[in-house]
């Protein structure tokens, strides 16, 4: 039997090129040429907040090192879901990125009935970028000085006799307090506000006795003595409040409820592009200049790779699912 040799095979053989070469070279080509146009970084919250500040730090760094503009596009709504959905449905080419939060990555799926995306299947994890501590803070009139004394005081007063304020149902402060209550065995009343500024105003005035909320807006008032910090929710002491112990080290081992931020791309983005993004963002997180910018925004650098982010999401999913189930929070 005579072997049939097509014209395509002859040409390929004469040129010394494998027919598989274009397939093998595709991802390498994507990495070598990426980026060759403007990149859009979607920030799923309004300007001026910590999420926005971190997004602009990451965008400015990538712009400077790659010479291609990275624009920040604020698309707020539904706890970050509006912006995250935009990225989930964008072309998987590395030119649309998400600067997401623990909400868009994990907790929103427990709090919203109709999620417009799957936080695992619809995204390619790129890098962990930053975190912030929640602070357990009280008005000075409250007769407690530590997290342990706070728990004892709340237990003595009785279930829901002591209140705490936070900016949202299912927000990081609310969930951190639910986590703390389940761990320590006490119950306080949740007073919901529309923003940390309103929580802060009532706390300073003594209208509410306590809060669990992101630290940055409370920091100057803690430093001035207008408020008292009982503990921070991070796994280690916070750089801007080094004398305030973590809640975990006050007898509540394992407590770690620090909100975090990350960068992701649409699922299907070429692995080499994801790696290039990941490597650069991890490198940035080790730069003294970037560390200073992140800390000036009230956060701390993380610098985790795409694999670190994927593993972190798995661990956070398991933790927060238990918290939400124990709190019996109904999806909105």
Image (cartoon, rainbow, N blue to C red):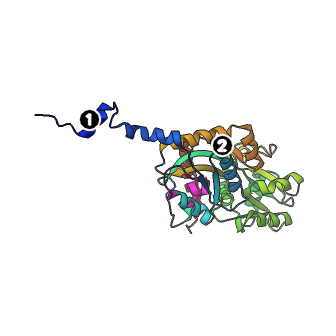
Label 1 packing within 10 angstroms: few (<14), some (14-19), many (20+)? few
Q: Check residue 49 for magenta coloring.
A: no
State the residue at coordinates (70%, 66%).
Answer: 190
Residue 302's disc is: 2
The location of residue 199, given as percent across then percent down, is: 77, 65
The residue range painted magenta reads: 88-109
The location of residue 163, given as percent across then percent down, is: 74, 65
Q: Can see residue 255?
A: no
Tag 1, which secondary structure?
Answer: helix
State the residue at coordinates (50%, 50%).
Answer: 93
Residue occupying the far left of the picture: 1
Q: Is residue 185 left or right of residue 244?
A: left
Q: Which residue is mark 1?
A: 10
Residue 125's disc is: none
State the residue at coordinates (51%, 57%).
Answer: 88
Q: Where is 249 relative to 167, above or below? A: above
Q: Check residue 97 for magenta coloring.
A: yes
Which tag is nearer the camera, tag 1 or tag 2?
A: 1
The location of residue 157, given as percent across then percent down, is: 76, 63
Most foreground residue, 113 or 29: 29
Q: Is residue 5 left or right of residue 290?
A: left
Q: Where is 238 relative to 14, above or below? A: below
């Amino acid at each position: 039997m005579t072997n049939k040799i097509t014209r395509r095979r002859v040409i390929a053989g004469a040129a010394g090129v494998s027919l598989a070469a274009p397939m093998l070279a595709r991802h390498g080509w994507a990495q070598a040429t990426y980026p060759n146009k403007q990149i859009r970084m979607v920030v799923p919250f309004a300007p001026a907040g910590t999420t926005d500040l971190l997004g602009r730090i990451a965008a400015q760094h990538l712009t400077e090192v790659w010479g291609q503009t990275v624009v920040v596009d604020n698309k707020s709504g539904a706890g970050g879901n509006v912006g995250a959905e935009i990225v989930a449905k964008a072309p998987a080419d590395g030119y649309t990125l998400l600067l997401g939060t623990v909400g868009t990555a994990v907790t929103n799926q427990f709090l919203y009935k109709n999620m417009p995306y799957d936080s695992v299947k619809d995204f390619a994890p790129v890098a962990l970028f930053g975190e912030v501590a929640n602070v357990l803070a009280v008005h000075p009139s409250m007769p407690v000085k530590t997290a342990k004394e706070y728990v004892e005081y709340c237990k003595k007063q009785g279930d829901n006799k002591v209140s705490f304020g936070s900016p949202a149902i299912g927000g990081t402060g609310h969930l951190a307090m639910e986590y703390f209550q389940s761990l320590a065995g006490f119950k306080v009343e949740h007073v919901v506000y529309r923003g940390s500024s309103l929580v802060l105003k009532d706390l300073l005035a003594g209208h509410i006795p306590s809060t669990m909320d992101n630290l940055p807006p409370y920091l100057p008032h803690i430093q001035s003595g207008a408020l008292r910090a009982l503990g921070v929710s991070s796994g280690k002491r916070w750089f801007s409040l080094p004398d305030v112990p973590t809640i975990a080290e006050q007898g509540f081992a394992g407590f770690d409820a620090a909100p975090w931020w990350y960068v992701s791309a649409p699922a299907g983005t070429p692995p080499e592009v994801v790696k290039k993004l990941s490597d650069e963002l991890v490198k940035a997180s080790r730069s003294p200049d970037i560390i200073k910018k992140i800390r000036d925004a009230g956060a701390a650098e993380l610098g985790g790779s795409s694999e670190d982010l994927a593993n972190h999401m798995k661990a956070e999913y398991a933790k927060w699912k238990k918290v939400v189930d124990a709190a019996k929070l109904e999806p909105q």
